[in-house]
Amino acid sequence: MTHINSFIPPVSSPLRDTTPLLLSLQDTDTLRVSFPASGPLPIPMTNDYLFRALLQRNNNVLKGLICSLLHLSPEQMCTAEITNPIELGTSVTDKTFILDIKVLLNDHTVLNLELQVINQHNWIERSLSYLCRNFDNLQSGDTYQNIRPVLQIGILNFTLFPEQPEFYATYQLLNVKNHSLYSDKLRISVLNLTQIEYATEEDRSWQLDSWASLFRATTWEELTMLAQNNDYIKEAADTVFRLCQDERVRMECEAREDHYRTQLGIQRMIERQAAALEAQTAKIQAQASSLEAQDAKIQAQASSLEAQDAKIQAQINEIELQAAEIDKLQTWMKAHGYDPADI
């Protein structure tokens, strides 16, 4: 498999930041805060608003997650700039909330990152749309060779292909005959939060299973366990704790949870209706099959009756022939002086 590292320029890039990637957790306006050791999380980690707020608030966590997803060392990740930030805490709607996070890596590669909780059965088309939209990034006067590489990574809380479950999958443009790579400038990856048990040794070596477990976590105890072996996740947990203390951010996260519940309610209602319709269709098909069987039986009976009628008619015809022969014989006997009654 071609490594995603080819998307990232060499470490000799003039954009290299001399600051270590793992910084101490201290914002310019907030002192270090430790998250609780136990209890339920106030907001699920699968909340897409919280996901965006976390990565937008803590660039260190953003870099750590991307390094794991792209199999990069911290030294290869110089800069990660979110180019479509939102104002955290402001009210959003379905039309105004930007689900995908667009990140410019090392001023060279475009990464579109999105967490999707509910299967809307459009992820394949949606991811392709985002990928192609971001790939069309030429500026006036640029040549085609200057097109920036584009990555689309979906973190999904559902299985995209149930017949082929996978934890972390990557897709590229390949020759269908010999599987040679057409271009390394386009790539789609999917991290399946529901299939952590399928994580490979390579996935685990890059701690992708730990990041997936983070996003699946529902308690502070789980975050505490994960943070013991991953400093980025420790930072993430601290940042999530601070974000949940922000009333405006928390309210927006809760609004998203209400949105999920509404969407799930609609989806389940549609699924129930679809199941009822399928059951009704199956019932109608069973009735139609039964009617066809009955019709076939009636047809068989009709054919049998026709055969019996034909047999009876043949017997009648035989009797009539025999009667005609007897009449002829009686006529001849009378003509020659014999009395048929004497025979």
Image (tube, rainbow, N blue to C red):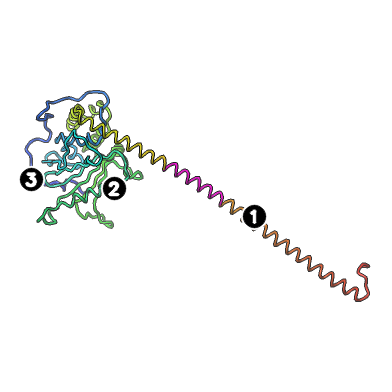
Name which residue type carries label 2: Ile
Check the image and report above or below for 326 versus 198. Answer: below
**Mark 2 vs mark 3: which is more N-terminal?**
3
**Mark 3 vs mark 1: which is more N-terminal?**
3
The Cα atoms of the two marked residues, 1 and 2, are separated by 55 Å
Magenta-colored span: 274-291
Residue annotated with mark 3? 13
Mark 3 crowdedness (10 Å alpha carbons): few <14, some 14-19, many ≥20? few
Residue annotated with mark 1? 301
Check the image and report above or below for 312 versus 237. Answer: below
Task: Indicate the quadrant where residue 302 lies.
Answer: bottom right
Residue annotated with mark 2? 124
Expressed as whole percent of the image width and height from the top left, the position of residue 79 reads 11, 41
Which residue extends farthest bottom?
336
Q: Secondary structure at mark 2?
A: helix
Report if the CB atoms under discs 2 and 3 are less than 8 Å apart. Answer: no
Expressed as whole percent of the image width and height from the top left, the position of residue 225 reads 24, 27
Name which residue type carries label 3: Ser
Q: Split into 4 quadrants, where in the image is the C terminus?
A: bottom right
Task: Indicate the quadrant where residue 275 lies.
Answer: top left
Check the image and report above or below for 59 versus 330. Answer: above
**Mark 1 vs mark 2: which is more N-terminal?**
2
